[in-house]
Amino acid sequence: MIVTTQQLYKHAYLKYAVGAYNINNAEQTMGLFKGCIDSKAPFIIQLSKGARKYTDKRILEAIIRTCEEIFPEAIFAVHLDHGDEDTCYDCIDSGFYSSVMIDASHEPFEQNVAITKRVVDRAHAKGISVEAELGMLGGVEEDIKVDEGHANLTNPDEAVEFVKQTKCDSLAAAIGTSHGAYKFKGQQSLRFDVIKEITARIPGLPIVMHGSSSVPVEEVRRINAAGGELDPSARGVDQEEYLPAARLGVTKVNIDTDGRLVWTRVHREFFRDNPKEFDFRPPGKVFQSEYAAFIANKNVKLGSADQLADLRKSLAA
Ligand code: G3H
Ligand code: 13P
Ligand code: ZN
């Protein structure tokens, strides 16, 4: 059942985080639904501009609607990830999306406010909620690359002003993470001080954490043992920090890279171990079940596992 993103936030806020998983094709979507049903977790499916181009947006919509029929117990929202203004309008007008993200964080503050405000007005008129970004994460967002030196943590004072002026429904805040596989070298931690400060000043506002993949060392090791050349020092977010962050206001946790690592590990190992194989379905099957197991495990770390029954009750009330 597709619900609004706000309904998911209302149930999760300050208790657990909802996993927001990027999908690009049928195998990922089927694995995602299975993993969320196995772990009894609500979830957010998010589609990037790149995903909507790679697999035509109409095909993605059809895959999601079909999965909704195949898995009637699933409770989820559909979200546009890192949208520009035009893509936001396309999604708002389509009637399919529960929420959109307008990402104008690379613009100066006033421009970011003006663009976000236009999207919020148009989305709210149709009952759709809006995630907006303030501050800059490092790494790659769609076609914009931000080097670590230019990444800026979200300033809580600016956040108050930004949310007041734009009336956005959730805030993607830069709290120490970055997109992609190469987030950190050595020990690092989320900026809990920034999360706390934003929640103290804007109570009730769900914070969205981008760049939340954990980039497991073992996954990188297996990919490299099967012919990959990823930097073995690559590190991501410590999964044990998801839940403490959720209890301080991080309500949506975006994960894409870790799923790509699962795909790469499964396929590299499969073709290494079966050099005569050329049918893509056998590794595709392995991928679906490995991806489902990966999702179920993430949901445990996010605290969203086993929340489905209580959410269903509160939606019915
Ligand atoms: O933050 C970006 C997401 O990981 C989506 O990646 O634009 O390559 O689909 P993509
Ligand atoms: P990762 O690259 O850490 O998976 O982040 C994904 C993301 O933020 C999508 O918006
Ligand atoms: Zn992101």
Image: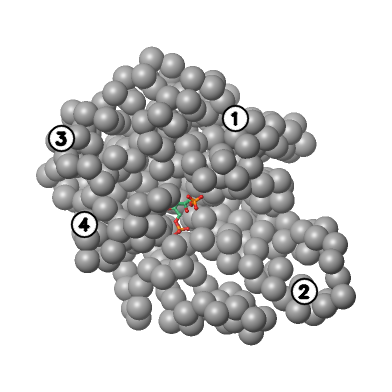
Marker disc for residue 152: 4
* CB within 8 Å, label 3 to label 4: no
Residue on which the image places disc 2: 271
* CB within 8 Å, label 3 to label 2: no
Residue on which the image places disc 1: 2
**Residue in the picture at 65% in, 71% down:** 265
Marker disc for residue 294: none
Residue 284: image x %, image y %? 77, 59
SS state under label 2: helix
Q: Earlier in the sequence, mark 1 or mark 2?
A: 1
* Amino acid bearing label 2: Phe
Residue on which the image places disc 3: 110
Compute the Cα span from label 3 to label 2. Answer: 51 Å
* Amino acid bearing label 1: Ile
Mark 4 or mark 2, which is nearer to you? 2
Question: Seen from this angle, which residue lies furthest left?
Answer: 157
Q: Earlier in the sequence, mark 3 or mark 2?
A: 3
SS state under label 1: loop
* Amino acid bearing label 3: Glu
Compute the Cα span from label 1 to label 3. Answer: 34 Å
Residue 202: image x %, image y %? 22, 39
Residue in front for this viewpoint, 151 or 191: 151
SS state under label 3: helix
**Residue in the picture at 22% in, 56% down:** 153
Say left or right for 258 vs 175.
Answer: right
SS state under label 4: loop
> Is residue 44 in view from this perspective?
no
* CB within 8 Å, label 4 to label 2: no
Residue 71: image x %, image y %? 73, 38
Compute the Cα span from label 1 to label 2. Answer: 37 Å
Mark 4 close to ligand 3, CB under 8 Å: no
